[in-house]
Amino acid sequence: MKLYVTPTSPYARLAMIVRLDLGLEDEIELVWTTTRVPDDPVLTFNPSGRVPFLQLDDGSGFEDTDVIVDYLDGLAAPLRYARPDPVDVHDVDCDGNGNGAYWRFRRLEALARSMLDGVSVWAREIKRPEGEQSPGLIAHERRRADRLAHTFEDEIGFAPLALAGEGLNRAQLLLFCALDVHRRLPDMDWREGCPGLSAWYDRMQEIPAVGGSLPPAD
C-alpha cells in the first residue's frame, strides 16, 4: 500500500501520525507528491486529487482522512482509534460516564475538526497572490481560531483531550494538527493566553509517532 501526502497538508500529517503510531511503516509506503498541478500523478487513480490518499494493492483506495484512519486501525486488532461506545442514545449528559463520554468525545472531536478546517482555509488563502487574498476571510478564520484555542484551553486537562498514557485518539490528533498549522501561519498566535494548551502541544510533539511525522520543509 502507498500513502500519498504533501508536506503542507495537516490532514496528511494526521494520517502519517496514525501510520507511525500503528507501526505500519513497512506495510505502507509514504509517497510525497504535489497537488493542484495538471500532471499530478495522484490524478491517475484519484480523480479528486486530494491528499492524503491511501492506495491499496489492487489500485483502489481512500482519500478521506477519517476513512483512512478507520482502515489503518482495522489492519491489526485491537482497534485503537475507535470512538467510545454510545450506551444510551437518550442519555446526552457529559458527566464522563457511559454515553456522556461518547457525546463529550463527539463534541470535542467536532470542535477540533472545525478548527482544523478553518485554519486550513486560512493557510490556503495566504498562498494566493496578495492582490487576490480576502482580508475578510483571513480575519474571520483568525477570530475563529482564537476563540477555539481559548475553548480548548479550558478543556485540555480533561478526557478525551488529556494526555493520560492511554494512547492517542482522533480528537487529540485533530486538535494537534490544527494547532500545528501555525508553522505555516505566522499570524496564528494561538499560544497567547493559552499556557495549558501550549504545554499540551509541546507534550504531543514528544510522542514518537507525532514527532516522527514532521514533514520536510516545503
Image (spheres, rainbow, N blue to C red):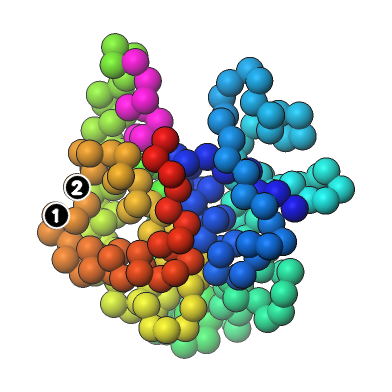
Residue 8: x percent and y percent? Answer: 44, 39
Mark 1–mark 2 Cα distance, whole angstroms, equals 6 Å
Can you tell which mark lies on residue 189? 2
Say which quarter of the image contains residue 126: top left
Queried whether the magenta region covers residue 20, the answer comes back as: no
Q: Secondary structure at mark 2?
A: loop
Q: Secondary structure at mark 1?
A: loop
Which residue sits at x=72%, y=69%?
74
Can you tell which mark lies on residue 35? none
Q: What crowding class fits label 1: few (fewer than 14 Cα within 10 Å), some (14-19), or many (20 or more)?
A: few
Q: Residue furthest right?
A: 58
Nearer the observer, 3 or 10: 3
Task: Look at the picture and state if 120 lies above or below 17.
Answer: above
The residue indicated by pointer 1 is 192
Amino acid carrying mark 1 in the image: Glu
Nearer the observer, 38 or 192: 38
Residue 163: x percent and y percent? Answer: 37, 78
Q: Confirm whether residue 19 shows in the render.
A: yes
Q: Confirm whether residue 144 shows in the render.
A: no
Q: What crowding class fits label 2: few (fewer than 14 Cα within 10 Å), some (14-19), or many (20 or more)?
A: some
Image quadrant for the C terminus? top left
Q: Which residues are magenta?
A: 121-129
Which residue sits at x=47%, y=41%?
7
Task: Look at the picture and state if 35 lies above or below 4.
Answer: above
Task: Look at the picture and state if 84 lies above or below 201.
Answer: below
Q: Are marks 1 and 2 in contact (CB under 8 Å)?
A: yes
Say which quarter of the image contains residue 35: top right
Amino acid carrying mark 2 in the image: Asp
Which residue sits at x=61%, y=70%?
22
